[in-house]
Image: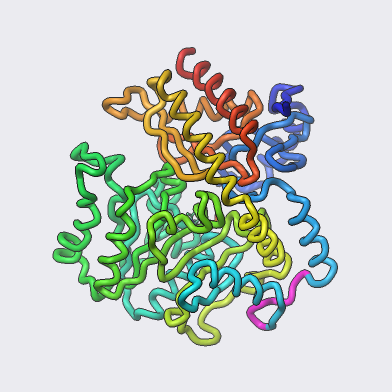
Amino acid sequence: MERPLIKTPPPGPKAKAHIERDTRVVSPSYTRDYPLVVERGRGLWIEDVDGNVYLDFTSGIAVCATGHCHPRVVEAIRRQSEKLLHMSGTDFYYTPQIELAERLAALVSPKEPYRVYFGNSGAEAVEAAFKLARWHTRRELNIAFFGAFHGRTMGALSLTASKTIQKKHYNPFVPGITHIPYAYCYRCPYNLTYPACDIQCVQWVEDTLFRTTMPPEEVAAIFVEPIQGEGGYVVPPPEFHRKLYDIAHKYGILYVADEVQTGIGRTGKMFAMEHYGVVPDIVALAKGIASGLPLGAMVARADIMDWEAGSHASTFGGNPVSCTAALVTLDLVEEGLMENARLQGERLLEGLRALQRSHESMGDVRGKGLMVGVELVKDRETKERAGDWRNALVRRAFEKGLLLLGCGMNTVRFAPALTVTAEQIDTCLEIFEEALKEVVYA
Ligand code: PLP
């Protein structure tokens, strides 16, 4: 059985030396939760510069969907690199970009025609959606959600409402955005839990927001994550998106799904919106799409993508190597990884729920597929958050050879590659429990 191997308690001597150099020259705005200096990765295994081996349940923040350096992805990248590295898909044509656009458009909707704009990141995909929504509707207002993370460029950041530090000192933002609560159920000020509330938070948009402060005919789009990612892996109730989508369409408002983190098989379906029976007007994709190469895509209904030549573009967006990596990623996801995400996701959720029965400190355990979060709480009844425990647990797990990250205020996130095995899930659960015990009962 493969296990993490910690030979030198991290950070080891080489890691320390790298971190010292980094601290002098690399932007201090990055958030490094623990001192991991990576040398190489293969599948779910990461080796650091001191030879320690870790089990990676972050997949490089939900990016390496096919595992680190999947041989088929690496081979496709090698072949494409020998043929063509760059030619700018905004000025010229090449096959991988066209092929990928065909694949993505058909995946988002086999029935209706969709078109694809390519960028390099999640923020660029969202930014493009933001601009397209304005272009197409000629409306100025937008709705987004508290807890949402859409990226850090000024447009995407204006839609973001995740943590104040991400917005501090950057005012003024793009005007016209109203943030509203996301699936109140989990944080309901009236302590209503689904289905008791009958998702009044959604109806509230029509009954209160549109009647008081936001004329619906001036609203271009609703930007929404199918499952909130950075906000804490918050899964909305089953009717949430359908009801919101219906309200949006009643007023000619575009429904924009930010599937940057949820998309490309992670939740056990190609797109998480499929769990909710909604085909959005616009979908933003990035992260897992190209197994680690930079790529963002904004997929919109063809009749909505009516902007003119010159209205938006990107030199590197849709790079041929990234598009080739994405095509193989889609093959792998369709050939079985998506199903594996569903199956192993169930095993992970069940395992965590079993642990929850013996650990009061584990609050809500939630997720879909391999997007799973566990809230740490001081008290299950009052839901008093335990962000300090969460941070300590993530650090302790790292020292034991398990890579995790946090999200939201007090949630531990589990986002392994879609190639994860049952054995790796069990190892993760074992180390998670050890770390939890050491942190909570210390
Ligand atoms: N949208 C969502 C839902 C995300 O989770 C992220 C990144 O975490 C982004 C957008 C921004 O992506 P990027 O960091 O590639 O710009």
Name the residue rendered at 20%, 51% in the picture.
200
Rendering coords of residue 333 (x, y %): 62, 55
The magenta region covers 85-91
Instruction: Look at the picture and state if 50 lies above or below 139.
Output: above
For residue 180, side relative to residue 309 (left or right):
left
The residue positioned 46% from the left and 23% from the top of the image is: 355
Which residue is found at the position 41% from the left and 67% from the top?
280
The quadrant in which residue 288 appears is: bottom right
Task: Name the one closer to the observer, 276 or 325.
Answer: 276
For the residue pair 113 and 359, the one nearer the viewer reads as 113
**Residue 384 versus residue 183 in the image, above or below:** above
Query: Looking at the image, how many numbered discs can be counted on the residues?
Result: 0
Q: Quadrant of the N terminus?
A: top right
Query: Measured from the top left, where is residue 313 in percent x and y?
Result: 57, 77
Q: Quadrant of residue 99?
A: bottom right
Magenta stretch: dominant SS?
loop
Q: Quadrant of residue 431?
A: top right
